[in-house]
């Protein structure tokens, strides 16, 4: 038995007990696979928890479903990052999907996830999925007017992920979307990463006409309160409605019609963070 601590800030962290630790050094990062009594297996990249068997469904469902549902008929979807496969699994629950491209910079994350996290990565072999081992920023340079939905399932904005939070990158995302396309990004914790959260929101609002922020409670992410920013030029995301039967068919454990109905109900202090200075 040993204790693993993720340092959320200089002053606070999350400590979990692990019965076993495997360590792999990839070209890009240190990958740990922890066996923990509380959260099941955990994937940790460069000391930061990416996903756990116990709570991964919350993040993956909330990242994928709102954008997928706000699009009338999502057929072509791109996931950037997301090498654990959880977001791809959720995307494939939508019957209209014909192709999912996964652009992950680190092939080792995919190999490790398929080996140790089959319940998360199990759909990566679906024939509709095509995997590109590449930097998401470069990948988008090749694609114009192609995707219905683009999902940024990136690690924190440091190192290789930093570029995925920039205005230039969001411009490329917009060019790669079809006219009625929608993007969504994980945008960190408003409580412990307020600056990253506000910066991502302000960069996205510079590029897209309609932008909305919503939250979910993810126990193993810093502070538990996690944000997502969704944007589109064509779809007015804040008033988008959806046929309830599409939600009912999804087989989710966290996301549901009631959450969709009040998706953008933000606590007042978070609303204040998003007001222009
Ligand atoms: N849910 C997670 C979170 O918020 O902690 C993110 C999960 S996913 C494993 C993040 C992935 O993004 C990592 O596997 C990492 O290798 C990948 N990644 C980082 N920078 C990237 C880039 N520039 N292009 C593509 N993938 C990138």
Image (cartoon, rainbow, N blue to C red):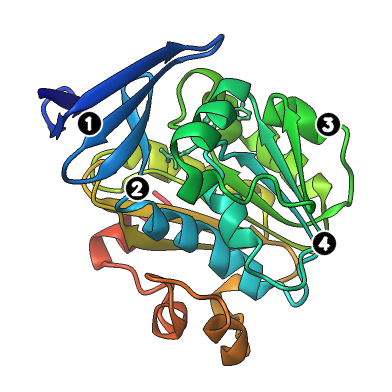
Closer to the N terminus: mark 2 or mark 4? 2
Closer to the N terminus: mark 1 or mark 4? 1
Residue plotted at (32% across, 45% down):
189
Residue beneath disc 1: 8
Q: Is mark 4 within 8 Å of ligand 1?
A: no
Image coords of residue 270 (percent x, y): 30, 58
Secondary-structure class at tag 4: loop
Closer to the N terminus: mark 3 or mark 4? 4
3D distance between C-alphas at marks 3 and 2: 34 Å
Q: Is mark 1 within 8 Å of ligand 1?
A: no
3D distance between C-alphas at marks 3 and 4: 22 Å
Q: Is mark 2 within 8 Å of ligand 1?
A: no
Residue beneath disc 3: 141
Residue beneath disc 4: 98
Residue beneath disc 2: 53
3D distance between C-alphas at marks 2 and 4: 27 Å
3D distance between C-alphas at marks 3 and 1: 33 Å
| Contact (Cβ within 8 Å) of mark 2 with mark 4 | no
Q: Nearer the viewer, residue 144 or 204?
A: 144
């Amino acid at each position: 038995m040993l204790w693993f601590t993720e340092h959320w800030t200089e002053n606070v962290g999350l400590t979990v007990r692990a019965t076993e630790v495997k360590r792999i050094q990839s070209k890009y990062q240190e990958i740990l696979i922890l066996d923990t009594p509380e959260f099941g297996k955990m994937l940790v990249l460069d000391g930061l928890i990416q996903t756990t068997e116990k709570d991964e469904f919350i993040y993956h469902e909330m990242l994928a479903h709102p954008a997928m549902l706000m699009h009338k008929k999502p057929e072509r979807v791109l996931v950037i990052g997301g090498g654990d496969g959880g977001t791809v699994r959720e995307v494939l629950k939508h019957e209209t999907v014909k192709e999912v491209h996964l652009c992950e910079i680190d092939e080792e994350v995919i190999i490790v996830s398929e080996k140790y996290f089959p319940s998360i990565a199990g759909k990566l072999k679906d024939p509709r999925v095509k995997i590109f081992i590449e930097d998401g920023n470069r990948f988008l340079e090749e694609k114009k007017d192609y995707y219905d939905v683009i999902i940024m399932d990136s690690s924190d904005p440091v190192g290789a992920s930093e570029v995925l939070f920039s205005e230039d990158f969001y411009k490329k995302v917009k060019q790669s979307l079809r006219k009625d396309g929608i993007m969504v990004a994980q945008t960190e914790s408003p409580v412990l990463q307020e600056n990253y959260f506000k910066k991502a929101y302000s960069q996205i609002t510079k590029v897209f006409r309609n932008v909305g922020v919503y939250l979910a409670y993810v126990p193993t992410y810093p502070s538990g309160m996690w944000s997502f920013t969704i944007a589109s030029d064509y779809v007015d995301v804040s008033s988008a409605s959806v046929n309830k039967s599409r939600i009912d068919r999804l087989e989710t454990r966290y996301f549901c019609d009631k959450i969709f109905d009040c998706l953008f109900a933000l606590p007042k202090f978070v609303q204040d963070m998003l007001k222009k200075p």
